[in-house]
Image (cartoon, rainbow, N blue to C red):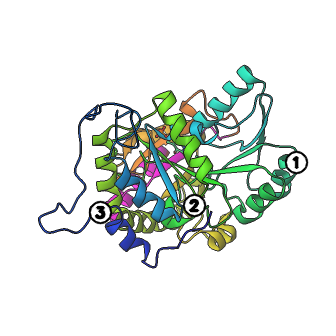
């Protein structure tokens, strides 16, 4: 369960972890091996055999992400959802799962499916309400936490609820997609497992769909790898190559995107056409004090409710020219969407909530486009 923490700073780990051995004439980057099968004869041992079971192209990315999260094992899977389902694999029939009511909507959809098929009890909580979470953990099997939540940006008291889970023997999973390991390290805060939609910040260029699990626990890592092989939830070698390429610049991208988000949130809070803005960097945000304690940066997702409700929110999306109206998040380009356009989004998410994924463009250009779109909605 223990491992030596890296003595290097995260920005250095992101660049250096998972490199091939430093040998004369050797490549600086790991080679991408495109082969579905490996030469093999006789009784198979530990060697590579068939790519559904393992390929050398996964390992450098897994090593680098595990190092950034401060975990012993990284396991890459075909999507964030595959990672979440693999991590949740141990929910017993008729078991109990505690989850934020505003978790990622497909996570909630999967838990509803478990409820229907296996009689699992899903306790949807306000993850920012620590007393409510601790009460729900009594008699639970798994805590599937998210902080900040997607899309409401609620901040959980992670050290307290993760300690509460541990005391009660509840297995804890934290979706760290929004914060990235540079903003928050859930294993250090007491989580059993971290999951990522690598699709988002880690890969960072809106060109792959990928997921990952990080854990210190040898048994959990073995179970997740077995899940990946049995269910075929594997990542393609080219996707993992792109994700590792993206990971090398994660610190630069996150630093810029987070700074842009904090500046835009500050300006939005003063804009006359804005009814509400949520970003944990704002001193007035309900999650600010907590986020400042447990996070090293506040992320680049901003929640925005324009004055004028649903119609005004749609008008903003129609009026932007630089921002891209699109789902997903965490790419270099700034995107936005009204979340309740999905009928599957939680009904307690306000209809007029826009989720902004702030990218790495020039902040003045982003502000000019967004503030013009807000003013446009007013006409
Ligand atoms: C996108 C997302 C997921 C799902 O990841 P995929 O790679 O799309 O399968 C899970 N959790 C959060 C917080 C996300 O934003």
Could you tell me which residue is drawn at 38 percent across and 72 percent down? 11
Image quadrant occupied by the N terminus:
bottom right
Decide: few, some or many residues near mark 3? Use Cα within 10 Å; few <14, some 14-19, many ≥20. Answer: some
Judge depth for marks 2 and 1 and give the one in front: 1
* Residue 106 spot, x, y in % from top left: 58, 34
Q: How crowded is mark 2: few (under 14 residues within 10 Å), some or many (20 or more)?
A: many
When the figure is inspected, residue 97 is found, relative to residue 25, above or below; the finding is: above
Please tell me which residue is depicted at 61% across the width and 47% down the height of the picture: 220
In this rendered view, identify the residue nearer to me: 117 or 36. Answer: 36
Residue that protrudes farthest toward the left in the picture = 25
Tag of residue 138: 1
Is 367 one of the magenta-colored residues? yes
Residue 298, given in percent of the width and then of the height, sits at 54, 65
Which numbered disc flags the more N-terminal residue, 1 or 3? Answer: 3
Query: Within the image, what quadrant is residue 336 found in?
Result: top left
Q: Which mark is residue 279?
A: 2
Secondary element type, mark 2: loop
Q: Secondary structure under badge 3?
A: loop
Label 1 Cα neighbours within 10 Å, binned few <14 / some 14-19 / many ≥20:
some
- Region in magenta: 349-377
The image quadrant of residue 358 is bottom left
Is residue 75 left or right of 103 when viewed as pictured? Answer: left
Residue pushed farthest top? 117
Q: Taking the image as drawn, is residue 251 in sight?
A: yes
Q: Where is residue 325 in the image (x, y as percent from the top left)?
A: 39, 40
Q: Nearer the viewer, mark 3 or mark 2?
A: 3
Report how far apart the C-alphas of labels 1 and 3 lie in the structure. 44 Å
Q: How far apart in space, not on screen, are marks 2 and 1 (Cα)?
A: 31 Å
Marks 3 and 2, Cα distance to the nearest angstrom?
A: 36 Å
Residue that appears at 71% across and 36% down: 91
- Say what secondary structure mark 1 lies in: loop
Left or right: residue 211 compared with residue 159: left
């Amino acid at each position: 369960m223990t491992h030596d923490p890296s003595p290097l700073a995260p920005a250095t780990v992101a660049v250096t972890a998972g490199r091939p051995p430093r040998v004369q004439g050797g490549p600086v980057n790991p080679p991408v091996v495109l082969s579905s099968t490996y030469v093999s004869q006789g009784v198979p041992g530990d060697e590579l055999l068939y790519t559904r079971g393992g390929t050398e192209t996964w390992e450098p990315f897994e090593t680098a992400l595990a190092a950034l999260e401060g975990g012993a094992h990284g396991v890459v899977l075909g999507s964030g959802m595959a990672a979440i389902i693999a991590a949740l694999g141990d929910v017993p029939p008729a078991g109990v799962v505690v989850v934020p009511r505003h978790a990622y909507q497909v996570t909630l959809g999967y838990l509803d499916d478990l409820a229907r098929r296996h009689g699992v009890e899903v306790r949807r909580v306000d993850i920012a309400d620590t007393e409510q979470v601790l009460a729900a953990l009594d008699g639970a099997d798994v805590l599937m936490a998210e902080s900040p939540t997607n899309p409401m940006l609620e901040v959980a008291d992670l050290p307290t609820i993760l300690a509460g889970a541990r005391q009660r023997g509840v297995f804890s999973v934290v979706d760290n997609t929004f914060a990235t390991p540079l903003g928050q390290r859930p294993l250090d805060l007491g989580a059993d497992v971290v999951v990522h939609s690598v699709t988002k910040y880690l890969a960072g260029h809106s060109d792959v769909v990928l997921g990952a699990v990080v854990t210190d626990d040898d048994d959990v890592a073995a179970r997740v790898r077995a899940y990946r092989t049995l269910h075929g939830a594997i990542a393609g070698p080219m996707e993992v190559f792109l994700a590792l390429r993206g990971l090398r610049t994660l610190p630069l991208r996150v630093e810029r995107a987070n700074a842009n988000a904090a500046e835009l949130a500050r300006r939005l809070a003063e804009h006359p056409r804005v009814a509400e803005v949520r970003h944990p960097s704002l001193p007035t945000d309900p999650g600010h004090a907590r986020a400042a304690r447990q996070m090293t940066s506040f992320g680049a997702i901003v929640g925005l409710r324009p004055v004028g409700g649903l119609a005004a929110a749609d008008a903003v999306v129609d009026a932007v020219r630089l921002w891209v109206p699109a789902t997903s998040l965490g790419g270099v380009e700034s995107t936005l969407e009204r979340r309740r356009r999905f009928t599957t989004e939680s009904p307690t998410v306000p209809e007029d909530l826009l989720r902004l994924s702030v990218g790495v463009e020039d902040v003045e250009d982003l502000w000019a486009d967004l503030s013009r779109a807000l003013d446009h909605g007013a006409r």
